[in-house]
Amino acid sequence: MTRHTQGQPDQTLERLPSGQLIVAPDAPLPPGTIVFTGNGSGDNVRINMKGGNVVLTQGTNTTTIPLNDVVPRGLVQISWAVAASVIAVFIGWPIARAVARYLDRRGRAVRADNALEAQLAQRFDAMERNIDTVAVEMERLSEAQRFTSKLMEQRPAAVAVPVDTNR
């Protein structure tokens, strides 16, 4: 006689010669075994994994279903594709953004350097023009100084004019 108690494995009841019933539990169920209670017939349905196959047992009947038949091959490929897409989005996207920002900042720095170089070139050109202008003016001043000195040398000596202090 077999008896099933909620949450416990099936148990076998044995009658002693004295007429007393004792409960002798069946062997413990392997880990991962799922037990569904029968519909009153007393036979429970047990589901467990053995060697990569799903094993269904009810009473003395046992059915083995290969795991490949349980999960279609296309479903496995789709699940891998979804996982790879999620990884690409959550890991690849931030990395791609960081690289794009780095390249953009580097480009801005190069453009800023080029703009600064152009501005410095303009300032040096203006300074060169100003220095040339000052040099031309200095040449004109020195020429005027030489001319004035030459005129002073060629002038006759000055005659002293008496100054009338009685006036």
Image (spheres, grey):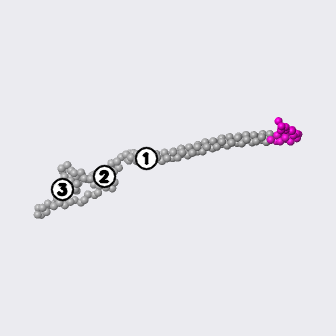
**As shown in the figure, which amino acid type bears the numbered disc 2?**
Val
Q: CB atoms at circles 3 and 1 under 8 Å apart?
A: no
**As shown in the figure, which amino acid type bears the numbered disc 3?**
Thr
On screen, residue 2 above or below 88: below
On screen, residue 165 above or below 39: above
* 69, 143: nearer the viewer: 143
Determine the residue positioned at 51% across, 47% down. 99
* 152, 86: nearer the viewer: 152
* 103, 86: nearer the viewer: 103
**As shown in the figure, which amino acid type bears the numbered disc 1?**
Phe
Nearer the N terminus, badge 3 or badge 1? 3
Of badges 1 and 2, the one in the foreground is 1
Determine the residue positioned at 43% across, 47% down. 90
Determine the residue positioned at 52% across, 46% down. 102
Q: Position of residue 133 (x, y in %)?
A: 73, 40
Asked if the stretch drawn in magenta spans residue 149, the answer is yes
Give the left or right position of residue 40, taking residue 149 as reference: left
Give the magenta part as a residue range. 145-167
Q: Identify residue for label 1.
A: 90
Nearer the N terminus, badge 3 or badge 2? 3
In which quadrant is the N terminus drawn? Answer: bottom left
Q: Identify residue for label 3.
A: 2
